[in-house]
Structures are given as structure tokens and as C-alpha cells.
Amino acid sequence: MSTRRHVLVGGGVAAAATATHLRKHGFDGEIVLVGDEPQPPYERPPLSKDFLLGTTEFEEFQVRPPAWYDEQSVDLRVGIRVTAIDVPGRSVTLSTGERLGYDGLVLATGVRPRRLPGLDGDRVHYLRTAADSQRLRAQLAESERVVVIGAGFIGCEVAAAAVGLGKQVTIFDPAPTPLARVLGATIGSVMTGIHRSRGVQIRAGEYISELRHTGDGMLLTSNLGHRVECDLVVVGIGCEPNVELAAEAGLATDGGIVVDEYGRTSAPDIYAAGDVAAQYHPVYGRTIRVEHHDNALRQGANVALNLTGSAEPFAEAHWFWSDQYEHSLQSVGRPADLEDLVIRGSLEDHDFSAFSLVDGRIQAVISLNRPRDVLEVRRMLFAPHEVTAEQLRDESVPLKRLIPRSPWATARA
């Protein structure tokens, strides 16, 4: 049995995927997984969906059941933080005071919600952890009027969940069209219409300038002078990467922990994966930080592969999904221009795929209720192909006939 020890820092899917794939690839040394939350690693998407609605129990979205860590000889340390990294001494210090030496160190420290100055109190919620979701769920049960600040994916998913519980929901977002930054104005308008059709009041182009606690709730005032009374507030204005531990150890950080295509940081034998990793992508030719569940899983698996002696670059197409009401929004790739999309299907019927097309190559697809289209594009995105806008619009031609198959593309799917 190997005497080597790999220390994984983080309680999310990236760290759990690293542990899983270290064992899968034959590493028989010591694995220590340190997470600052009191639970084993779990998936976060349900926190704004099924778990928030109370239709899913926590045990259902743990990455691995607790017994797995014992079975695989993974030393799971929950409720403990890594407080310092000694790069020359190849060790970390824990919040318990213990020092752990490492042969390989993986930083999967994730992100934290961006906070609004002056917006706090018992009925103001930021959503990131299972505890956050439980607290929000308990207060939703006794509330009628909900304000969501920020119409990003988290904000929109929480709004949809609150509507499903029969609540009155108002969304404030400073952008003229909610979700336009990530989906473009056309699709952002479609998603805005879906929310409005469910009774959500969307105040686009507005932000909260004042919050005042009243005897039985809160009174919010916007920059345009509109006042809204509510029982609770949910703030979803994006996240900040947890880079402090890495930065204090002298690792390169720039909007995340900077890593190369193999997941390696600027320090020997230290890797980063998941939401915190700003990784160079060999296909896109630039450094990108991605806050999506699938990306964290795949980066963790890739880091494990490279820790066990391979040299495999991470060259995956980025994929994400968002469930809002009965609608499934998915995307794969990176659009070149969100305002120049080729539409296949019907925007009005909420059944379409929007393609980013440049010089005959698909750069990305954003689909609403068309998961098969996303699957087809994901299989071939980086493979040689050539299509036209007319072909993509023509639904009489199955999309799979426009996409060449190659062993490489299939293997990457």
C-alpha cells in the first residue's frame, strides 16, 4: 500500500469527485477530505429547487452515502477548515490545530454569495449551503410576500419555488432584461415572460436603495422610488470565489485560483477544481472560471487522473441546466454573440434551441425544453463540422443528420 497522502479541501462535488476517481484510477494511499460544513459532500442544485420545496430529503443528493467514505478508506473530516497552507513544508494546518503533510493537495473551496451592504437581518437570505436552504424553507412556510433581489439563475429558481408554494413574488434586477447577461435579450425576455405568466412581479431596471424593518416584515424602496412590503428577502446577485486560502499561501489568483489545463496551480503538487478554479481551456484558448455542477464533477475527475500520473488536459464543453416551473433550460458551449442566435423551434411555445454559429461551426446552443438538441451538440461541439443557419432552422431535417460523428467526439460526450 502506498504511503502517499492526498489532501482534498472542500465539501462539494469537486472534492468528492476527486476522491472517487483517485480510487477508481488505483490510488491506494491515504485520502483526507476536509470540509467546513457539518455534512458529507452534497450537490447544491437542489437547494434552490426540490430541497427548498421540501420534496427531496438531504440524503438523496449527497454525492456519496456516508458509509462509502469508510468503505473506500477516505478520511472524511467535516466541520473543519483548512486555515493555512505551508507550500515549502508541503503541509496544511486545520482549524483543530493539527498539521497534515501532503503529497498532493486539491483546493476545491468553492464560492460564497456576494452580499449587499446594509441588507441584512433575520429575514434576509443568501443561498449557498444546505443550512441556508433549510432556514429559507422554514421562513417561506410562514410567509406570503417574497422579494427576490437579482434575476440570475438562483434568484429565478427561488422565485419559481416560492410561486409553487403559493407565495406572492416580486423580483428586482438592475438589468433591462433579466438573465440577458447569460442568455441574451431574446431568451431573457422569454424567461421573463414565463415568470410574469405565473404572477411574478418583475421590476427590471430597478435595484433596492433602502431596506427598513417593520414590526411584522420589511419595507423596501427602489432607486425609482417604488415601495414594496414583504415578509422575507432573498438576495441572489452572484458569487465570489473563495481564494483567500490560496492567496495567503502565495498561489496565483485572478478572479479565482489560477490553474493550467491540467488543473495545476502555480505551486508544485497543488491543484484546484470546481467553482473556484480559473482554468486555462485549450480549445477556447483562454482562462475561464465556471460555476456549474457538471463542470465541478468533471474537473474533480480530471484532477484525480492527473494526480495518478496522467497528463490529461481538461477540454470539456461547459454544460449547465436550470429548472424553473415545468421548464428545463439547458446550454452547452460558449456563445460567441448572445444577440445573434439562430432559432430552431418556437419561442412563443417555449420549445426551441438557440444556436451560436460562427463560420459554419456551432459555438454553443441554449435550449428550452429540448434536451435532445443539447445532447446532440454536446457530442460534437469540438469535432470538425459545418452547418448553415438555414439547416439549423429547418426542423424537417433531424439535427443529428447535420452533425458528423467521430470516435473522438463520441468519447468526449
Image (spheres, rainbow, N blue to C red):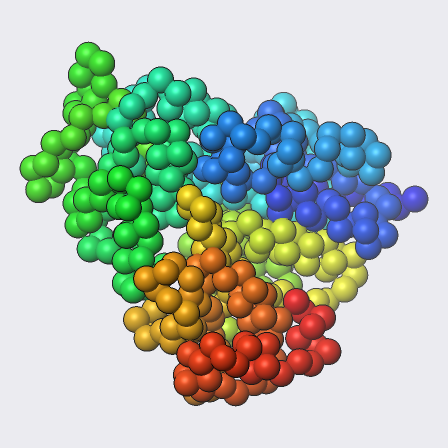
Which residue reaches farthest right?
Answer: 1
Return the x and y of residue 108 as percentages of the image width and height.
Answer: 58, 45
Query: Where the C terminus falls, by quadrant?
Result: bottom right
Q: Residue at x 72, y 54 (%)?
A: 304
Picture layout, residue 167 above or below residue 356: above
Q: Residue at x 45, y 28 (%)?
A: 132
Task: Report how many numbered discs are placed on residues in the image.
Answer: 0
Of the pair 331 and 15, the residue shown nearer to us: 331
Picture layout, residue 52 above or below residue 198: above
Which residue reaches farthest top?
Answer: 215
Judge left or right: residue 40 versus residue 253: right
Return the x and y of residue 362 as percentages of the image width and height.
Answer: 48, 78
Judge left or right: residue 128 versus residue 223: right
Judge left or right: residue 169 versus residue 362: left
Return the x and y of residue 155 as percentages of the image width and height.
Answer: 35, 41
Q: Residue at x 59, y 77 (%)?
A: 400
Residue 309, located in which quarter of the rendered image? bottom right
Judge left or right: residue 374 versus residue 225: right
Of the pair 409 and 159, the residue shown nearer to us: 159
Which residue reaches farthest left?
Answer: 225
Query: Where the N terminus falls, by quadrant?
Result: top right
Instruction: Using the rendered image of the protein, determine whether residue 397 is visible from the camera's viewpoint.
Output: yes
Picture layout, residue 361 above or below residue 11: below
Residue 385, located in which quarter of the rendered image? bottom right
Of the pair 316 and 156, the residue shown nearer to us: 156
Return the x and y of residue 188 as percentages of the image width and height.
Answer: 31, 58
Q: Residue at x 34, y 64 (%)?
A: 347
Instruction: Using the rendered image of the protein, determine whether residue 88 is visible from the camera's viewpoint.
Output: no
